[in-house]
Each structure stands twice: as structure tokens, then as C-alpha cells.
Image (spheres, rainbow, N blue to C red):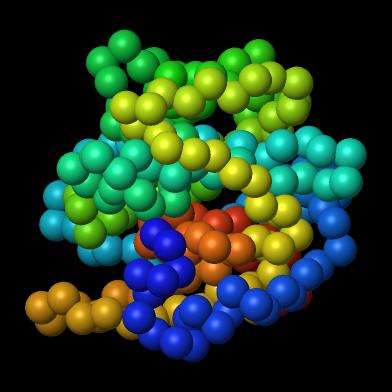
Amino acid sequence: MPLRNIRKPWIRSLASCRCWRPAVNKAAFLHRFHSSPPLAVSDDYPLTHAGRAAGVLVPLIDRPEGLTVLLTQRALHLAHHPGQISFPGGKQEEQDKDLIDTALREAWEEIGLPRQNCQVIGVMPEHRTITGFCITAVVAIVEPEFDIIIDSNEVSDTFEVPLAFLLDTNNYITEHFHRGPLTNPVHFIPWQNRMIWGATAALLRNLASIFTDNN
């Protein structure tokens, strides 16, 4: 979602805010990830049913200057969430042996990310969404030597954000929205001319929890 579509001026103003941790390299991240697993998000949507299983890949690109997170922008012609920022991923299909397989398959189909470039290091707690999905995020270290090939039926663009930026919770803002008797928090992360929000931001916020001082 472009920043101009976000009406609240205090959200737009965060685009100029740059709070940074030091760059995070692969060794440091793996140590923290495995010693302090991500906390289960407490602000997901309370579904009354199991939810449709979906798997997304959280691709951490192993750059010399530090890890980055590869994100996609959904195609504008899609019926659901057009133009929104997301991870590669989708619904679990019958041929998928598990949700890790789902995430890796979708990443290959959407952006041409080869499985052999992905070192899966773990999965995050399930996240339930207002649209009825139960999302499993698969975290992987990705070797950068591959050519992105976008499936224009699903994706309009890709971009990277330094992991250090996304691990700093000062870069997040939370709004509370009402739906019937429920009040749910929604996280926003402005980055350059883009707005990361919704389930993608919630999953990133959960990942950032392993780097907070009180975890």
C-alpha cells in the first residue's frame, strides 16, 4: 500500500523516521533465533474454526553488509489484498508434504527463488487472520546468487529491507481497529514509499520479539 493511501498524518510522518540497530549478520541472527524462539503473537484474530492452512517464506538474504528481508508487492489486479506488501506464500496444496513445502513451492512460483538457495532454520508460531487463514511463517537464510523471476499474475514487484530496521520495534506503530465486539491491533511499518502492514507486519513484529531486551 503506498503511503499516500494511509490517511493518518502521524503514520505518513514515520516514513522519515529511521531507527536502526547495528547490522545483523547470519551468525548473530542464528544464535539469537535458536536461543530465544519467537513468541506466539497474542494479537491475531480469534477464529471460531481451524482456519485455512497457508505457508509463507520469510527470506533472509545473506548480504555482505548484513541480512535483509525480501518482500513482494502483490499484483494490483488480484481480487484479494491487491498491491499489499507480503511474503512469498499461499494456501497449502494437496501435493505439499507440509507447510514448509508450501512456502518453498510458492517462493519458487512467485519470484523464482530456488529451493537449493534456502536454508530453512525454523518456523514461527501460527498466525490467524481476519480473512480466515492460519499462517505458518517459514524462516530461511537465502544465498543471494539467484535471479528474481516475477510471476506477474501474482506479484508486481520485490524489494529488500535491512533486517536491522525490521528488528527495531521503534519502527512499528500500532493502531486498534474495531470489528463487531472485537478490537484488534494492526501494525504498520513505513519503509521508503511503501507501507508494510497487516499480517506481514504482525509476523515481522513477532520475529522482532526475539531481539527485544526483555525476551
Q: Is residue 177 above or below residue 150?
A: below
Is residue 155 visible in the rendered structure shown here? Answer: yes
Residue at 27% x, 79% y is: 177
Residue at 81% x, 67% y is: 21
Q: Is residue 38 above or below residue 101?
A: below
Q: Quadrant of the N terminus?
A: bottom left
Residue at 22% x, 46% y is: 80
Q: How many marks?
A: 0
Whole-percent x and y of residue 148?
A: 59, 24
Whole-percent x and y of residue 40?
A: 48, 59
Whole-percent x and y of residue 42?
A: 41, 68
Q: Quadrant of the C terminus?
A: bottom right
Is residue 123 visible in the rendered structure shown here? Answer: no
Place residue 151 in its image quadrant: top left
Whole-percent x and y of residue 93?
A: 28, 20
Q: Residue furthest front?
A: 4
Of 64 and 48, the residue lying toward us: 64
Residue at 69% x, 69% y is: 168
- Using residue 79 as the reference point, say whether residue 180 is left or right of it: left
Of 110 and 166, the residue lying toward us: 110
Of 169 and 35, the residue lying toward us: 169
- Using residue 172 as the reference point, say whether residue 43 is left or right of it: left
